[in-house]
Image: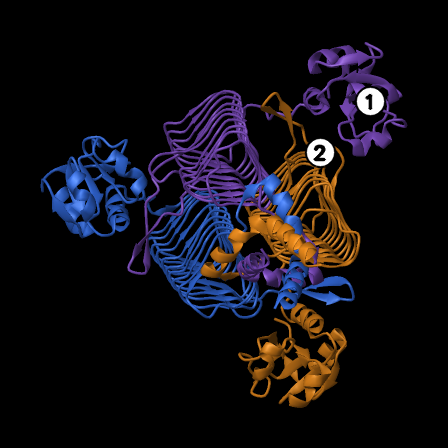
Chain colours: A orange, B purple, C blue
Amino acid sequence: MPTFTLAELANLTNCQLDGEYDCAVHSVASLPSAQTGQLAFLNTKDFRQYLPDTKASAVILKPGDAKNCPCNALITSNPSLAYAKAAEALHPLPKKSPGIHPSAVIGSDTNIDPSVAIGPHCTIGDKVVIEAGVNIGPNCIIEDHCHIQQDSRLLANVTLLNQTRLGQRCLIHSGAVIGSDGFGLADDDGKWVKIPQLGRVVLGNDVEVGAGAAIDRGALDDTILADGVKLDNQVHIAHNVRIGEHTAIAAGVGIAGSSIIGAHCMVAGMCGINGHIELADHVHISGMTAVTRSIQQAGRYTGTIPIMSHRTWRKNFIRLKQLDDITRRLEKLENSSS
Amino acid sequence: MPTFTLAELANLTNCQLDGEYDCAVHSVASLPSAQTGQLAFLNTKDFRQYLPDTKASAVILKPGDAKNCPCNALITSNPSLAYAKAAEALHPLPKKSPGIHPSAVIGSDTNIDPSVAIGPHCTIGDKVVIEAGVNIGPNCIIEDHCHIQQDSRLLANVTLLNQTRLGQRCLIHSGAVIGSDGFGLADDDGKWVKIPQLGRVVLGNDVEVGAGAAIDRGALDDTILADGVKLDNQVHIAHNVRIGEHTAIAAGVGIAGSSIIGAHCMVAGMCGINGHIELADHVHISGMTAVTRSIQQAGRYTGTIPIMSHRTWRKNFIRLKQLDDITRRLEKLENSSS
Amino acid sequence: MPTFTLAELANLTNCQLDGEYDCAVHSVASLPSAQTGQLAFLNTKDFRQYLPDTKASAVILKPGDAKNCPCNALITSNPSLAYAKAAEALHPLPKKSPGIHPSAVIGSDTNIDPSVAIGPHCTIGDKVVIEAGVNIGPNCIIEDHCHIQQDSRLLANVTLLNQTRLGQRCLIHSGAVIGSDGFGLADDDGKWVKIPQLGRVVLGNDVEVGAGAAIDRGALDDTILADGVKLDNQVHIAHNVRIGEHTAIAAGVGIAGSSIIGAHCMVAGMCGINGHIELADHVHISGMTAVTRSIQQAGRYTGTIPIMSHRTWRKNFIRLKQLDDITRRLEKLENSSS
């Protein structure tokens, strides 16, 4: 692994260095476990207790914490960001050597750059284009007419169905399925008839897709995730959804068909978003909320039930079906007392 | 791709043709993007605005929209159904040529029809039966004693655990797992002991299973999905569940063990259905509802919290734990004022 | 399959035998379907109706049911546990013969015990250690530096990302992904920068992971599941979560980053557990509950909305946003009437 001086890291992370310019660090570690030669960071107050006794060679922290730092300090208003950059420099992702493993099966009329690495047991379809620097893990399937742009990375066991397009520097985690059929059904007198799903999935640059996530192809037009969209594990994106730039969606969220999510939104875990609705830019949704309608204004929205003891719940939640009656009885009393 | 005249399509889709019988169309497209030679459809009022300016050669629509159609019209009371049939005719699913890819590993005592196509890197177990016209995508696993009936189709990366049975014309999407163990545990003084899961999964004809869905085998008797059941992505079906004909279950729904779902039900996304309960036929459940009890009557049922601004939520939802108290105080006032 | 006498089974399951010591049984079956030579069990009152007419050779049941048993009885206070042990003896999991399938690709510097079975199309990375008796199904991927301890079992299509550690006798179901990246992002002025995920996943002994489950590696320190933890299908465990011994988590649950779950907890299906919170030992959470805060006391907790007809819901749930106002109006009336 590479080694950096603190001067180099300060430069790289845009931090102010309070300490030895030529002190060398070789790896990152958490504040309580770090040793000499390691870099730690302090972001949340939970970890502040570990600062005075840390054995790290340097700590990335906010200006207000610098006075309590027992070692070299890299000072910034955004320790998470500085840490992300330092950690990436110190722990670069191992890249496989270019080349196609002999057990991989490659279709006809493909255009695969010589710098591409393709792992064992991959199945690559016909007319697939894979640009320079792409890294494809073992047991991946890339169907006909897919196009993967420069430096994207598929981990093990990723499935791209036909015609899927990935931008540059995308990162797709294991078990993800991109380009599956949307759930399009027509009712033929009580029996379901499948509506062919003919669109594609198109991902922009720097999109990350979590383990086990599923993104359905469009019914006719495409399902589109813009640059910088980040999906956590097991997210479901239905057909014809469009998601704006740099929106982050946490694990287990489901977005129903044809909804349009703005840019810079944050959707917490296990929310469900109805079909055919629109969310403005900069909308934040709290976890496990049912987004049942469009939201025109930036801001935070919630529909989560607070947890309580089962006994408290049983006593109170029986009243939910009486709420309308309760309100009407209250109105009656108000009228009689006025 | 095949080309059809409008006379042929009208016949195929059971529509009334208002226009040129011999006009040829070669593909479908959405109303705003369609060009000459393409067929569009108008189903929801959202798209009505695009009708007057469409460049499609023909549009499938309801009788009431025919007067505003600037081109040939295929008129029907059910445009979705007519569109599904036309799209399937114009865009037939590409079938792989019969044959077993040399990289596939095939067990002993199998009975695989010569018309079957099996893709690269598949693993087929012992005593597997695969009937005529079945199409198995790359990297699928079909364990011992599975039986797949005519014309079923497994996309890439599907796993069928041992003894799974698929009916005719089933469609299984990537990442789906059918026949996994149910979550059966016995409590041995605080430690869990696994209860062997010995039943099977049996799917009827025309069942569709979405990407990443998981259907557990029965503990002793079988888990059964009847003809025409449709599961969307990431649905979870626990052991010994039984689902009636033509029930459609949207993405992210979980059904706990031994529950019995009626025929022609519709369960919207991310609902959870308790174990050991029964739903009658024709029950519709709104999204993200917890189905905590049996439902004997057809109809629509809901338990979704409406989304609101976080500020409104914080102010009101603290009161949920006071509901019983609020009701009792109201009763007291009512008694004192009467 | 092996055959046992009732005397042997009584001994094995710690039951009291009321009947023929040398009666032989060869398999288990449900109470209504069992035939001569089969063993059934009666645990829940739902099945009591089938006892008088059962054709089983023996039934495992509680003392109170023994008087109605028409055949041999194996009597115990915990029929589920006795059944689990008997079923495991009568239906042992088939073990593949030791050996590495020639289509599997094995990395360098591995340490794989000769008793290990590795199925077709597996990809095993460098420096992997696999101990005696481990069974790895077809199309699995085990990346560099993984370590799998004795007698663990991976079913088909399991992915272990680099450095994952499994204890003894773990059971990992198809489609599971262990060691995927956590969802760590730093905000760079509206754009997300990935925080490298450098920790591992470490599973104790006897851990079971359901189909399609995803367990993320730690950001720096490890994600840890203690001995005997059981995860059902499609569970999501985020980075740095720690789960205590013998906790069982049902299908579709998501646990956000850095939360600590106690020992012997039970989390019902589709709950969401916030990040950075702690649950004490022996906490039980009802299905679909949002666990929004730490819980210090053992007991049952709930936040589930009861299902109701859509009509009842529409009338009452509009009032949820008025709850604070309702309460204040009630207070006003109370004050004016006192």
Q: Is residue B18 above or below residue B193?
A: above
Which residue is drawn at the image coordinates 40% and 62% (left, top)? C204
Q: Residues within 10 Å of mark 2 (few under 14, many from 20)?
A: many
Q: Residue at x 19, y 47 (%)?
A: C64
Quadrant location, the C terminus of chain C: bottom right
Tell me if label 2 and label 1 are in contact, CB under 8 Å: no
Work out whether residue C115 or residue B33 is closer to the camera in this orientation and state it.
Answer: B33
Q: Nearer the viewer, residue C36 or A199?
A: C36
Label 2 amino acid?
Ala
Residue ID for mark 1: B65
Gap between marks 2 and 1 measured at Cα: 22 Å
Q: Which residue is mark 2?
A: A219
How many marks the image carries: the answer is 2
Instruction: Estimate the x, y position of residue C113 in percent, counting from the top left.
Output: 35, 56
Q: Secondary structure at mark 1?
A: helix
Tag on residue A224? none
What amino acid does circle 1 point to?
Asp
For the residue labelled by badge 2, is the local secondary structure a helix, a strand or a loop?
Answer: loop
Q: Which is nearer the eye, C8 or A74?
A: C8
Please state if B250 lies on the left or on the right of C26 as rendered: right
Q: Nearer the viewer, mark 2 or mark 1?
A: 1
Position in image of residue A208 (x %, y %): 67, 54
Q: Along the horizontal axis of the image, is B18 left or right of A201?
A: right
Using the image as rendered, state which of residue C78 and residue A147 is in the foreground. Answer: C78
Q: Which residue is situated farthest in the front direction here?
A: B338
Q: Is residue A86 above or below residue A64?
A: above
Position in image of residue C292 (x %, y %)? 56, 63
- The answer to whether A5 appears left or right of C46 in the picture is right
Corner quadrant of residue A79: bottom right
- Left or right: B81 with respect to C118? right
